[in-house]
Amino acid sequence: MHKLATWLPVRVDAMRDLTPSIREFKIVGLPPATCTPGAHVNVRVLIGGAPDHRSYSVTRQLPDGSFFIAVKRAPQSRGGSAYMWALEVGSLLQITPPACDFALQYGQAHYLLIAGGIGITPIYSMALALAARGAVVRLLYAARSAEEFAFRQELQAALGSGVEFVCAAAGQRLDIAAEVNALPAGAGLYVCGPIGLMDAVREVWAASRRAPTQLHFETFGAGGRHATQAFTVNVPRLGLRLQVPGTQSMLDALTQAGVPLLSDCRRGECGLCAVDILELHGELDHRDVFFSAQEQRSARRMCACVSRLAGGEVSIEAAWRPDPVLR
């Protein structure tokens, strides 16, 4: 569970653009040695004037405690990246203590790291840590265009020929099956990226009959199989019917309407915000990694934090905290 009760004051010490759409922030105010590879922090942001929070991976931490996060400016951002990109050097922030749900396990014979787009942020910290230990590691980094590869020089310096950049604009594609089949027994695979990449890796890994415990993944919950658009959600028990705009998650829309849903990760990983689907009119766009492929196909439940409809309407039954206003 993410601890949102403790917030630490920090300050933006420096910024630089890693790519045209990815900006790196140097943050000061943490004590030394508090971040591990794969760690993240929650940052308090303002969305439409209302307080909220967003989770960002820590790409690295310096001995003095200062650390770095990288934020992609999303064209269809719900407001988090726009808020972060509006910050200036000297801006004050509040963050939660670093936590790690995507922990790197040392001591394996071989590592395969796969990153798609902004999914490089936790993978980058892992690549540097493994390289420093002399581990056998291969990194596949896919991006839409050559200019969107963040940390390119740093990764080449750390991994040499162990890193491969896969550019979609150049017609290049990841051959996930070939990469997995080439792994020796006992190897670990770590992947972070869009939901399509995650699903492809999980499918190949399952087909290879390798140990499920050797596959580790994290999603940033940003995209799905369909373009983000508005849809309608009904909660019959409450007599509630509302529109979820394309700029807002179903979780946020329901919470704003007074339905205090349980939630935690907000990335479609923990399943705490899952709701039962009573009736569906439209195509469900699962953007979570909590439910299995079979569970997603059944269309009986969905994660309110990231999953949505490609237009249409859904009626749900949700678990929520007791609230006198809703009784």
Image (cartoon, helix red, strand yellow):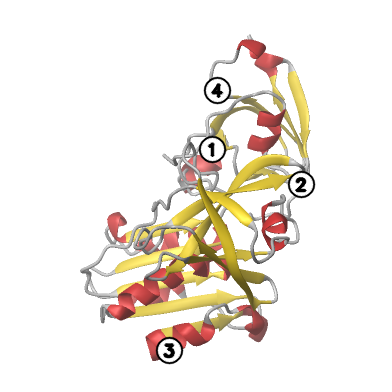
Quick check: can you spot residue 206? Answer: no
Q: Amino acid at mark 3?
A: Ala
Asked whether the viewer can see residue 25, the reply is yes
- What is the crowding at mark 4: few (fewer than 14 residues within 10 Å), some, or many (at least 20)? few
Give, as a three-letter code, the residue at label 4. Answer: Trp
Q: Which quarter of the picture shows residue 189?
A: bottom left
Image location of residue 2, percent across then percent down = 44, 42
What residue lies at 60% left-to-right and 25% top-to-bottom?
260
Q: CA distance from mark 3 to mark 1?
A: 46 Å
Q: CA distance from mark 1 to mark 2?
A: 24 Å
Distance from disc 1 to disc 4, alpha carbons, whole Å, reads: 23 Å
Q: Quadrant of the N terminus?
A: top left
Mark 3 or 2, nearer chain start:
3
The residue wearing badge 4 is 320
Which residue is under mark 2?
Answer: 246
The reply to whether dot 1 and dot 4 touch (C-beta < 8 Å) is no
Residue 66 at what x, y percent from top left? 46, 66
Q: Disc 3 or 1, which lies upstream in sequence?
A: 3
- Label 1: which secondary element: helix
Q: Secondary structure at mark 4?
A: loop
State the residue position of label 1: 298
User: Which-is-in-front pick, marks 1 and 2?
Assistant: 2
Disc with the residue nearer the chain's start (2 vs 4)? 2
Disc 1 versus disc 4: nearer the observer? 4
Tell me the SS state at disc 2: loop
- Measure how far apart labels 2 and 4 are at the Cα level: 23 Å
Which x, y percent locates residue 299?
57, 37
Query: Disc 3 marks which residue?
Result: 157
Q: Nearer the viewer, residue 283 or 49?
A: 49
Closer to the N terminus: mark 3 or mark 4? Answer: 3
Q: Residue at x 65, y 55 (%)?
A: 225
